[in-house]
Amino acid sequence: MTTTEQQVLIDDLDATGEQCKTVLNRLKSKNDIEEFDELVLNLQELVTKRQNLLNALIADDSFVQRDYLQRQLELTLSLEVKAKLVLNSLHSEIHLGKKNQRQVNVYKSIDSDR
């Protein structure tokens, strides 16, 4: 049985987990770098909040719902995988952008040599 305080933590933790998923999904589909930066900051804040909520729940010795904590661990691993996919996608886009800029510079150089 959970106390009222524990239930508040659980509800807040569930809501924060959903917000993390939403932000990660939005990050996967964004091309605007300014909005991307804002979403990343938002995600960092949510992850910190989620970690603090988990720490508070774990510190409560009377909380014994192991299955709930197991689901939270699985969610953490899932969020980590999604975040790595977004990061890898961003790295690829940055690399591609640098490659394209080098190609443009080569063409400019060739054009100026004419």
Image (cartoon, grey):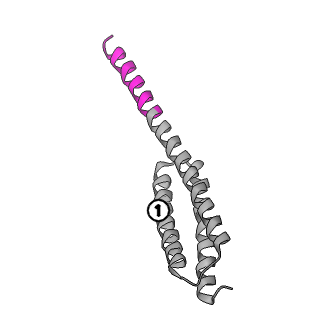
Residues 73 and 42: in front is 73
Residues 59 and 56: in front is 59
The answer, for residue 31, to whether it is visible in the render is no
- The residue shown at (60%, 83%) is 6
- Residue type (three-letter) at the residue carrying disc 1: Gln
Q: Position of residue 36 (x, y in %)?
A: 49, 52
Task: Tell me the SS state at disc 1.
Answer: helix
What's drawn in magenta, residue-wise?
Answer: 96-114
Q: Is residue 98 magenta?
A: yes
Q: Position of residue 66 (x, y in %)?
A: 64, 72
Q: Quadrant of residue 2?
A: bottom right
- The residue shown at (35%, 14%) is 110
Q: Is residue 113 left or right of residue 82?
A: left
Q: Is residue 91 magenta?
A: no
Residues 35 and 75: in front is 75
Q: Position of residue 74 (x, y in %)?
A: 62, 60
The answer, for residue 106, to whether it is visible in the render is yes
Which quarter of the rendered picture does the C terminus lie within? top left
Q: Position of residue 60 (x, y in %)?
A: 53, 82
By secondary structure, the bulk of the magenta-drawn segment is best described as helix
Which quarter of the rendered picture does the N terminus lie within? bottom right
Q: Residues within 10 Å of mark 1 (few under 14, many from 20)?
A: few
Q: Which residue is mark 1?
A: 44
